[in-house]
Amino acid sequence: MNDRTVAGDDKARFAAVVLPHLADAYTFARALTRNRADAADVVQEASLRAFRAIFSYAGGNARAWFLTIVRNTAYSWMAKNRSPMLVGVEDLEAVERTQSAGAHAQDETPEAALIAKADAARLDAAIAGLPVPFRETLVLRDIHGLDYREIARVTDVPVGTVMSRLARARRRLIVALGSKE
């Protein structure tokens, strides 16, 4: 087998394993970095890391494998590129718009759209205000739909910790959203 064949196999494997999960990777990176441009940088770096390590992918859940790389990349990227005192807060409005945009969007009244936008902004701000371990667990479960075992694998914590973080994150969201009425 020559180098060209190996490189071609790696490209095909990367396309099959990583590329289908780029949107999820961006959403997750954005939840962690709270900034669109930073999230794009993180996903680009994570994709490069995934390509370099594609030979080590042993099968299983490709999305969990790639999101683990995204998570690790996000933390190393933020440690290198952000001052510890800098706190950037950019809401997750694009995620909400993407999720709420559906077949019924054209039937929506301007008032309903304004209310939905305000509600989404409140939710985004409440999610952004969660501590990072709670926020990442909540995003992986409620936005990306990973199960507890997959989240445990991505975040490198026990399943019980995932369950605890998710419950606490949801409780904090309920309190935050309920207190701003």
Image (cartoon, rainbow, N blue to C red):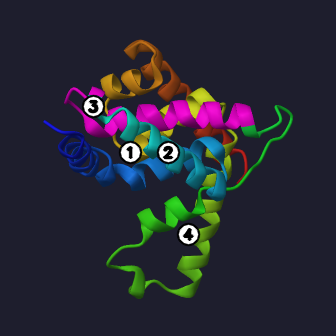
Q: Viewer-nearest of labels 3 and 1?
A: 3
Q: Quadrant of the C terminus?
A: bottom right
Residue at disc 3, secondary structure: helix
Q: Nearer the viewer, residue 12 or 99?
A: 12
Q: Amino acid at mark 1?
A: His
Q: Are marks 4 and 1 in contact (CB under 8 Å)?
A: no
Residue at the far right: name it.
Answer: 85
Q: Crowdedness of circle 1 by 10 Å Cα count: few (<14), some, many (20+)?
A: some
Position of 143 with respect to 86 (left or right) is left
Q: How many marks?
A: 4
| Mark with earlier residue (3, 2) | 2
Q: Viewer-nearest of labels 3 and 2?
A: 3
Position of 87 with respect to 117 (left or right) is right
- Which mark is drawn over residue 144? 1
Residue 113 lies, with reference to residue 141, above or below; the image says below
Residue 78 drawn at (x, y percent): 69, 37
Q: Amino acid at mark 4?
A: Ala
Query: Which residue is disc 3 drawn over?
Result: 55
Query: Which residue is disc 2 drawn over?
Result: 28
As measured in the structure, the alpha-carbon distance from the residue carrying label 4 to the one carrying label 1 is 21 Å
Residue at disc 1, secondary structure: loop
For image coordinates 41% across by 80% down, the residue present is 105
Q: Amino acid at mark 3?
A: Phe
As measured in the structure, the alpha-carbon distance from the residue carrying label 3 to the one carrying label 2 is 24 Å
Residue at disc 2, secondary structure: helix
